[in-house]
Image (spheres, rainbow, N blue to C red):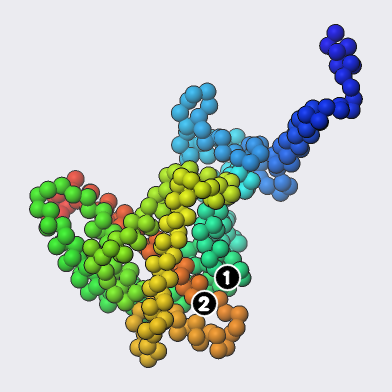
């Protein structure tokens, strides 16, 4: 009867709704087949789902709690071997899970594996403000190559000129420590959160090299910038913004953390661009005050001899951002952990 019923259907179907449904079903099946195919040459691994890839593997099944990533990857290594592949969205990811594979990649093939992957959320925050010729501006996320080596070499030598890694930086740190002590003593025996004080002090040491000055802890612009950077980092790793790395178009949604992140990006950009403009207007070529002055002088020199140089104010903007985001957050958290351990083990302070 079922066959008889099907035989009675008109073919090809003439109902526009039926045609649309069949076309949509065919399109979805085709997309599923195309997007779930494993490209040739990739190591073995679980079959990805369209659009989300293997993202579902991180979630628990049957109501169970999600596995920790390291446990999940260890389990997959037992199934697929020490070198296997996963997909984050449509992006392939190769997992190395034993010593020999890691050594082969990072030691024997170091030149090949020195690059960093292009993270969609980082690309969204950087590429549209840089010149079209810049692949990934800055130093931290820039691709390994001649431009990265050139920018890193200049940045490292210039920061060392202003004390990085030398004893000459110690007086600036000790001076900032005085302000830290003053701020902490204001609370007396009352409990307080040391995060903003430590973050301000670390940022001020960076400011002394990058901007040639320190900011008062109550400076409105300074407090706002640090708060925005901290908030941007928080929502980039602890909110739905993470999904931008799977579906980049989500970045442009006009609501929620997506809209908030775009506003933070705009405000931080305005602050740093203002600092760079002030340095440009007061630049003293015979007496550079800080990293920004040195970079602006390098831009002028490069323009005279190399019209295609990677040195420009857009790149300077991203390097300054790298210094703050990469330097402030890591150093602040390290110092906070030190304070916590000294509080838990006061006998260590006696040493």
Query: 168 or 34, which is in the foreground?
Result: 34
- The answer to which of marks 2 and 1 sits earlier in the sequence is 1
Q: Position of residue 111 (x, y in %)?
A: 58, 64
Q: Are marks 2 and 1 in contact (CB under 8 Å)?
A: yes
Would you identify the image quadrant in which residue 293 lies? bottom left
Q: Judge left or right: residue 338 versus residue 188.
A: right
From what the image shows, is residue 130 above or below residue 74? below
**SS of the residue at dot 1?**
loop
Between the residue at mark 2 and the residue at mark 1, the CA separation in whole angstroms equals 9 Å
- Residue at horizontal 23%, vertical 63%? 218
Q: Judge left or right: residue 139 versus residue 89.
A: left
- Residue hosting label 1: 131
- Residue at horizontal 45%, vertical 53%? 261
Q: Position of residue 21 (x, y in %)?
A: 76, 30
Q: Give the residue furthest to the left.
A: 188
Residue 153 in sight in this render? no
Query: 333 or 307, which is in the foreground?
Result: 307
**SS of the residue at dot 2?**
loop
Q: Find residue 312 and name its label.
A: 2
Circle count: 2
Q: Judge left or right: residue 135 versus residue 195.
A: right
Q: Position of residue 83 (x, y in %)?
A: 60, 45
- Residue at horizontal 32%, vertical 60%? 224
For the C terminus, the image quarter is bottom left
How many other residues sit within 10 Å of disc 1, few (<14), some (14-19) or many (≥20)? some
Q: Position of residue 205 (x, y in %)?
A: 29, 69
Q: Give the residue furthest to the top.
A: 1
């Amino acid at each position: 009867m079922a066959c008889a019923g099907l035989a009675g259907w008109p073919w090809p179907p003439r109902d526009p709704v039926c045609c649309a449904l069949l076309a949509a079903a065919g399109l979805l099946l085709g997309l599923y087949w195309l997007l779930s195919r494993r490209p040739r040459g990739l190591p073995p691994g679980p079959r990805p789902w369209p659009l989300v890839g293997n993202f579902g593997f991180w979630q628990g099944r049957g109501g169970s709690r999600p596995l920790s990533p390291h446990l999940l990857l260890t389990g997959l290594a037992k199934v697929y071997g020490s070198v296997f592949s996963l997909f984050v969205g449509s992006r392939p990811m190769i997992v190395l899970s034993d010593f020999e594979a890691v050594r082969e990649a990072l030691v024997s093939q170091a030149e090949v594996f020195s690059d960093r992957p292009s993270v969609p959320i980082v690309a969204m925050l950087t590429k549209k403000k840089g010149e079209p010729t810049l692949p990934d501006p800055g130093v931290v996320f820039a691709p390994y190559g001649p431009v990265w080596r050139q920018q890193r070499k200049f940045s490292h030598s210039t920061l060392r000129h202003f004390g990085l890694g030398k004893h000459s930086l110690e007086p600036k740190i000790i001076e900032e420590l005085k302000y830290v002590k003053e701020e902490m003593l204001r609370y007396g025996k009352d409990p307080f959160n040391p995060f903003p004080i430590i973050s301000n002090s670390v940022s001020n040491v960076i400011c002394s090299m990058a901007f040639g000055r320190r900011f008062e802890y109550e400076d409105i612009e300074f407090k706002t910038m640090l708060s925005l950077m901290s908030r941007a980092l928080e929502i980039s790793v602890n909110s739905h913004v993470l999904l931008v790395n799977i579906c980049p178009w989500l970045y442009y949604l006009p609501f929620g953390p997506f809209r908030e992140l775009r506003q933070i990006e705009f405000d931080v950009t305005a602050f740093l661009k203002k600092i760079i403009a002030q340095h440009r207007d007061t630049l003293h070529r015979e007496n550079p005050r800080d990293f920004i002055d040195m970079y602006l002088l390098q831009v002028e020199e490069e323009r005279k001899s190399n019209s295609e140089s990677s040195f420009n104010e857009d790149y300077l903007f991203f390097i300054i951002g790298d210094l703050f985001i990469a330097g402030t957050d890591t150093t602040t958290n390290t110092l906070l952990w030190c304070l916590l351990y000294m509080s838990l083990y006061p006998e260590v302070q006696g040493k």
